[in-house]
Amino acid sequence: MVVVETGRRSWGGDPVVWNGGGGGGGGSSGDRAVMEAEYVRRHHRHETRENQCSSTLIKHIKAPIHLVWSLVRSFDQPQKYKPFVSRCVVEGDGSVRQVNVKSGLPATTSTERLEFLDDNQHILSIKIVGGDHRLKNYSSIISLHPESIEGRPGTLVIESFVVDVPDGNTKDETCYFVEALIKCNLKSLADISERLAVQDRTEPIDNL
């Protein structure tokens, strides 16, 4: 049923993996860590079974939240920012998508269901329900939160997931693989969003 309403850690530019730690030194970093922990507690709840692994990644993007959300909320067009998606076809009422994956990954297709979409809180949740891959019972939540970066509107992106550990793999191996994919997605999301933000700032203003 779709509901629609209108780890490790560091402070670098790359997506980081959150384990509930205290964050960096200094007041602002400490405050930011507390705020991030509260967002994770509030929006990223997963029931993790013994044969599953779970992780949470964080990315700071130098673009306003409305630009970033316009990309993230496009359930029917994940290829807007996900570099490994070559094609997407939406089925039925729009809550299920068939995704074709680019060559180079151990999969060619993925069937994904929209679980939750909230345009007010900027939260999107999906669940993988099929495909020729090993990501069984994969669920993810991505939430966006406004923040100020270098005096400009920015966006804090938090993405978490839970997934079965395949036979023959360890929890660490499984998490490392999924985290690598999400990091690529978040880097692409940041690059595209920040480019759009620059374009917005440099567009001429008519009718002055």
Image (cartoon, rainbow, N blue to C red):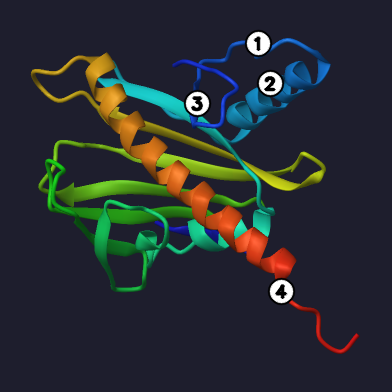
Mark 4 closeness class: few <14, some 14–19, many ≥20 residues within 10 Å: few
Image quarter of residue 34:
top right
Say above or below: 71 vs 36. below
Which disc is residue 203 wearing? 4
- Name the N-terminal-most of marks 3 and 4: 3
Label 3, label 4: how far apart the Cα atoms are:
33 Å
Q: Give SS at disc 4.
A: loop
- Name the N-terminal-most of marks 2 and 4: 2
* Residue in front for this viewpoint, 168 or 125: 168
Q: Give SS at disc 1.
A: loop
Circle 2/circle 1 CB separation < 8 Å: yes
Query: What is the x, y in percent for residue 100?
Result: 19, 59
Residue at image x 73%, y 25%?
32
- Mark 2 residue type: Ala
Label 4, label 1: how far apart the Cα atoms are:
40 Å
Residue at image x 51%, y 56%?
192
Query: What is the x, y in percent for residue 7?
Result: 44, 16
- Name the N-terminal-most of marks 2 and 1: 1
Q: Which residue is identified by label 2?
A: 33
Q: Which residue is identified by label 3?
A: 16
The reply, left or right, for residue 140 in relation to residue 97 is right
Residue at image x 60%, y 22%?
11
Q: Give SS at disc 2.
A: helix
Label 1, label 3: how far apart the Cα atoms are:
14 Å
Comparing labels 4 and 1, the label whose residue is closer to the camera: 4
